[in-house]
Image: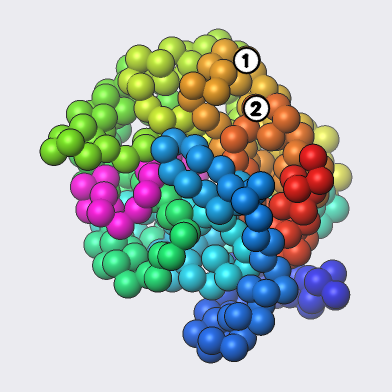
Amino acid sequence: MYSCLRFFLFQFDPEKIHHLVTGILNRFFRINWFRNLVAKSLNLESEKLHREVFGLKFKNPVGLAAGFDKNAEYVEAFAALGFGFIEVGTVTPLPQPGNEKPRMFRLPADEALINRMGFNNQGVDVVADRLKRVNREDLIIGGNIGKNKWTPNEDAVKDYIICFDRLFDVVDYFVVNVSSPNTPGLRELQEKEPLMHILNSLQERNNKDGIAKPILLKIAPDLTNQQLEDIVEIVQKTKIAGLIATNTTLSREGLASPEGVKNQSGGLSGKPLTKRSTEVIAYLYAKLGSAFPIIGVGGIHTAQNALDKLNAGAALVQLYTGFIYEGPGLIKAINRQILKK
């Protein structure tokens, strides 16, 4: 059924149809009987799915990755689809429009997407105020934070602190995003010295007044083993809560899509990332063990893809492109497969 709907949706511009469909769904999910009907159909409830990670209790290990709900507009609707946690953002201190359109491209031959959105969002104040009104129940919400495009890298820490302070009371965990390829110079912040400075500054902020929230770092799949070794050292020294592996890739290796599409600039997500993201998870888990939990994301299009990441060492998983290609039934399929283990 979803494949027929996907065929229809894929006839339209990716970004436009995303906003149209999520807006329509959000309106329908305000109707109690509709929300309850969908939740009953798609949700799996079992204590065997419960996870305690970073000191937080998740009702299931399948989450929605950052980028899908940048402005926290649809949190309750996505929760009704069966996600165990929702990550909003990436959020910046001030609103910004992002890069020029078109900035999102489908690669059906590869079951992938390329995006160069550029942290388009309404700003941290809007997102924080919106999250105050969310019906949380047992839902975990993460806040993915970044810097404004015009903020020089030497001042980037100030942007991360602004977002951290503003969102502190309305999210359960934080993700420091220095790995998006779509903000010029951002990935330079993954280098050891600037990254240590950002994470240590946030940790100092985090440990004030006797309250702390988990801080995670989201990394790129394009890091070398030496760079991953640096990440391991940084995680251990800064004592952050864990990692998200991985963000989108700049690689275009092995793609079957036409040149005009696959050579668009931006980050590639979807099936071409499946293997590499799992390799990164396994590498990091071998170095860090369970002391620093990993959220696995990248190329999860089947329940087996998710299990592979969990078996490689991920404590939780997130969906983005697979959710677009496979539909909300993928969430239930993953949870059902986990229950069979």
Q: Residues within 10 Å of mark 1 (few under 14, many from 20)?
A: few
What percent of the width, then of the height, locates residue 160? 28, 41
Residue at left offset 54%, top offset 73%: 77
Q: Is residue 211 left or right of residue 277?
A: left
As drawn, which residue projects farthest toward the left? 209
Based on the displayed image, in which of its 4 quarters is residue 316 positioned? top right
Kind of residue at disc 2? Gly
Whether residue 313 is visible: yes
Residue 202 left/right relative to 100: left
Disc 1 and disc 2 in contact, CB within 8 angstroms: yes
How far apart marks 1 and 2 lie (CA) works out to 8 Å
The disc placed on residue 286 is 1
Is residue 174 inside the magenta stretch? yes
Report the residue marked by disc 2.
313
Q: Which mark is residue 198?
A: none
At mark 2, the secondary structure is loop
